[in-house]
Amino acid sequence: MESTRRTFLGTLLAACLAGAGLLLRAGAAAAKKVAIDLSKLSSLKDVGGSAVVSIKKKKILFIRTSEDRIAALNPECTHQKCAVQYKKKWGEIRCSCHGSKFTTSGKVLSGPAEKDLKSYPTTIEDGKLIVKI
Ligand code: FES
C-alpha cells in the first residue's frame, strides 16, 4: 500500500515537473530575436530619435537613448492602455489620456500609471537592431 502511494506521488511529481519544463520551453520559444536594418530607420540614426514599428502584430516604440543603445517599449500605457507618445523635445514619454509620464526607458516618472512600460531587450550589431520579442 505504501509502495503504491509512493509510486503515485512519484508519478504525479514527474508529471508536474514535465509540465513545468514544457511551460519554460514554451516561454523561451515565444521570445524570438528580430533583426531590423538600421539603415532603413533613419529616424533612429540620432540620439533622441524614435520610431514606431509593427513587428509580429505588435507595435514597438523604439527610442535611441544613446549612441549604443535603443530602447524598445510597448507603447501601451500601463494605466488604461492608451497609446503613449514620445517627442525628442519632451525627452520623455507621455500619455495624453490621464497624464502619466515615463522615461525613455519606460520607467514611470509620474502617474496615475504605477507600472513601467513593458520593455524588450535590444542590442545593436553590425548596423542591425536586434530585439527580442
Ligand atoms: Fe495613460 Fe491613463 S491611460 S495615464
Image (tube, rainbow, N blue to C red):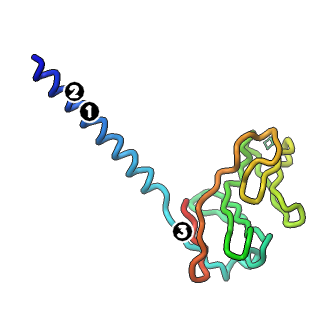
Q: Is residue 59 above or below residue 67?
A: above
Name the front one of labels 3 and 2: 2
Front-most of 28 and 57? 28
Q: Which residue is mark 3?
A: 34
Could you tell me residue 133's position as x and y percent? 55, 59
Tell me if mark 3 has few (under 14), some (14-19) or many (20+) residues whose alpha carbon lies within 10 angstroms of its own.
Answer: some
**Of callouts 1 and 3, the N-terminal one:** 1
Give residue 116's position: percent from left, percent from top.
70, 47
The type of residue carrying mark 3 is Val
Disc 2 marks which residue? 9
Q: Position of residue 111 (x, y in %)?
A: 81, 41
- Please give the residue where the numbered disc 1 appears in the rendered image: 13
Q: How far is the residue under mark 3 from the one under mark 2?
A: 43 Å
Dot 1: what SS?
A: helix
| The label number, if any, that marks residue 67 in the structure image | none
Query: From what the image shows, is residue 71 above or below residue 95?
Result: below
